[in-house]
Amino acid sequence: MVHLSEREQQLPDQAIEKLIELMVEDKSVLSLGPGEPDFPLPKPLVSEVKRLANQVNHYASPGGLLELREAICKKLKKENGIRAVPENVVVTCGSQEALLIAAAVTLDPSEQVLLPNPSFMAFLPTIELFNASPRFFSLKEENSFEPDPDEIRKNIDRKKTKVLILNSPANPTGNVIRKKVLEEIADLAVEFDLSVFSDEAYEKLVYNGAKHVSMASLNGMDKHVFTFQTFSKSFAMCGFRLGYVVAPKHVAEAIKKTHVYTTICAPTISQKLGVKALSLPAKYTNAMVKEYDKRRKVIVERLNEMGLSTPSPKGAFYTFSNIKHLSRNSKKFAFELLKKEKVAVVPGSDFGSEGDGHIRCSFATKLPVIETAMDSIEKFISRQGKK
């Protein structure tokens, strides 16, 4: 039998993998699981793909096309308040690859990384792939799932802690970290000389007056912050696998060097398309956000009406509902819901121990599907209460 590394065998199993398999096998399943926009590619980008078809069969440079990095720098200054030059930017196959390579170039075995619990399911495995040591700070429902700077401070080991991971707008909780809180966390990063991995994949998906703030825009923080952004959510470009990281020049150079040993470069066609995407008027993204907001209001109201405590998300496209009065085993709850009502949700346990007793529902799906799924969940909960 082929030997598997101990590292691989210790990576966590995710219920979402099995859920996806079951959804593929049974087309009648109503899915509230997707982490990608259900909108088509904006029409100008469809035309651009056709135009580029015979022009993009060669590698790009490991750092990314200069014209794209220049366009990203303009976008960062205008939309995020981040001052960067092309040498600060490395373009990757989605922001997840950027995160993986950043971990590779900054972490040695046994060094410590602070990360939120619950949080995006890829954070912990990324850390463990490089034999770094995770340490968690809790995101509490009563605090709107916002990080507590005091708890972060208590978990910092002055000798071991090297990296702090933040995600805003957040998956799975939908929280958007307020500027005041970011400033307090920034002070900790300076005091303890921490690198901050700031995952901002959902930066443009905010609602109800919430404002996304990039930590690297705060005074002096560009020396500490790695900003991870992507074209997947804002432009419905998930399949094109295009993201980037903005970091201090010497770090960006190290990421670029290591990129040669992963995928060499992001797809050339995707990078050319990225240049076009950054030139589009805001109406395309705004139309998506407007529709998400409509769905958000419906799904939050329905979930709360059926007794599932569901804070209204300020960003991203997920709700995170408390089901502890019904079951503290969110994986069991999710699989029973799938089996009996053919509705797929993601168990909170996939996002960390603090996520258990919750379920994540995506509203990146059509409103009629959401409404039918809500009816089915309500039936399921009604039967649970009669047991």
Image: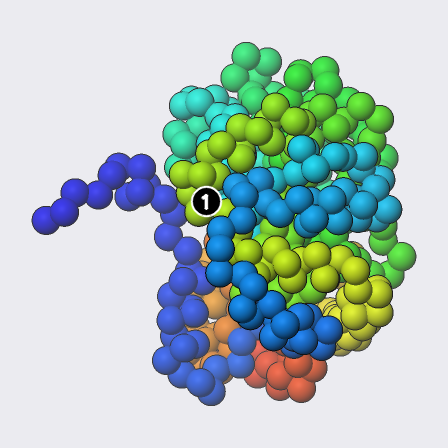
Q: Position of residue 271 (x, y in %)?
A: 61, 55
Q: Residue furthest front?
A: 55
Q: Confirm whether residue 371 shows in the render.
A: no
Few, some or many residues within 10 Å of mark 1 (<14, 14–19, 20+): some
Which of these two is toward me, 115 or 35?
A: 35
Q: Residue at x 50, y 47 (%)?
A: 265
Which of these two is toward me, 143 or 195?
A: 195
Q: Position of residue 242 (x, y in %)?
A: 59, 55
Q: Position of residue 209 (x, y in %)?
A: 89, 57
Q: Residue furthest left?
A: 1
Q: Amino acid at mark 1?
A: Ile
Q: Residue at x 54, y 68 (%)?
A: 54
Q: Residue furthest top?
A: 159
| Residue hosting label 1 | 264
Q: Position of residue 119 (x, y in %)?
A: 58, 47
Left or right of 322 in this view: 304:
right
Element type at marker 1?
Answer: loop
Tell me if residue 35 comes above or below residue 185 in the rendering: below
Tell me if residue 322 comes above or below residue 336 in the rendering: above
Scheme by which the image is coloured? rainbow
Left or right of 8 in this view: 84:
right
Tell me if residue 313 comes above or below residue 102 in the rendering: below
Which of these two is toward me, 229 or 181?
A: 229
Q: How many marks?
A: 1
Q: Confirm whether residue 222 shows in the render.
A: yes
Q: Residue at x 76, y 27 (%)?
A: 221
Q: Residue at x 42, y 69 (%)?
A: 19
